[in-house]
Amino acid sequence: MKSSLIKDRIRRILSLILLAVTIAILMCVGVGTFNLPSAAAAIQVLEESPDRILYQSRHKFQDNRGNAWQVVFFKRVEADESPSLNLRLVAFPGTADFAHPQPLKIKTKTGKQFEAEDLFAEAAPTANVGQYNLENILDRLPSFASIDLVTTMKDDRTVALKIPSEVILEWQTIAGY
C-alpha cells in the first residue's frame, strides 16, 4: 500500500515538473517570438519600363532630436547607361529644410569620413528632401558597424542619423545587383 502511495506522489511530482518545464519553454519561445528585431530585408525591385529597373531599400529612422526620417537607398539601371547609386533623405514636412548645395557627411566608427555629392544642388523637389550620390563611397563603408549620416539644415542645426550595419549591408547587396 505504501508503495502505491509513493508511486502516486512521484507521478504527481513528475507531472508538476513536466508541466512547469513546458510552461517555461512556451514562455521563452513566446517572449523570443515577440522580441525579434525587425531587421527583415526591405529590398524592392520595380520595373519602371522594359529597359529600366529600380532596386530600392526603405527604412525609417529617428535623428538626434527625435524627428522621423525616411532613408531610401536606390540603384537605377537603364539600358546602355551606367547604374546610379543614390541615397535620399526625407524629413516630415516642416521639421527640416535642407541647405542645398551641401554634401552629406558620412562618419564611420573607426573615424573615417566621406562626403557624398548633393544631387539636389540645383533644385530639390521639396525643401524636406535631400539626395546624394554614393557611387564612389558605398564600397568603402563598413558592413560590420553602424555609420552616422550628418548634414546641416537651413536653420544651421545639425541633423545626425545613425544607420545600422544591417542596412549598410542591404545597400551593398543592392549595389551588387
Image (spheres, rainbow, N blue to C red):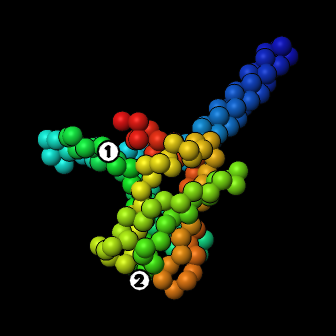
User: Residue 95, image x and y in percent?
Assistant: 46, 80
What residue is drawn where x is 30% and y is 43%?
82
Q: Is residue 40 above or below residue 154?
A: above
Figure quadrant of residue 120: bottom left
Task: Answer left or right for 102 relative to 65.
Answer: left
Question: Which residue ends up furthest to the right in the rendered image?
Answer: 2
Q: CA distance from mark 1 to mark 2?
A: 32 Å
* Nearest to the observer: residue 134 or residue 157: 134
Is residue 38 something that shows in the picture? Answer: no
Q: Which residue is mark 1?
A: 83
What residue is drawn where x is 32% and y is 44%?
83
Figure quadrant of residue 21: top right
Residue 143 marker = none
User: In terms of secondary structure, where does tag 1 sit?
Assistant: loop
Q: Residues within 10 Å of mark 2 (few under 14, many from 20)?
A: few
Task: Answer left or right for 3 relative to 33.
Answer: right
Task: Answer left or right for 159 relative to 5.
Answer: left
What residue is drawn where x is 79% and y is 22%?
10
User: Residue 152, image x and y in percent?
Assistant: 54, 75
Callout 2 amino acid: Gly
Which quarter of the rendering shows the N terminus? top right
Q: Which residue is mark 2?
A: 94
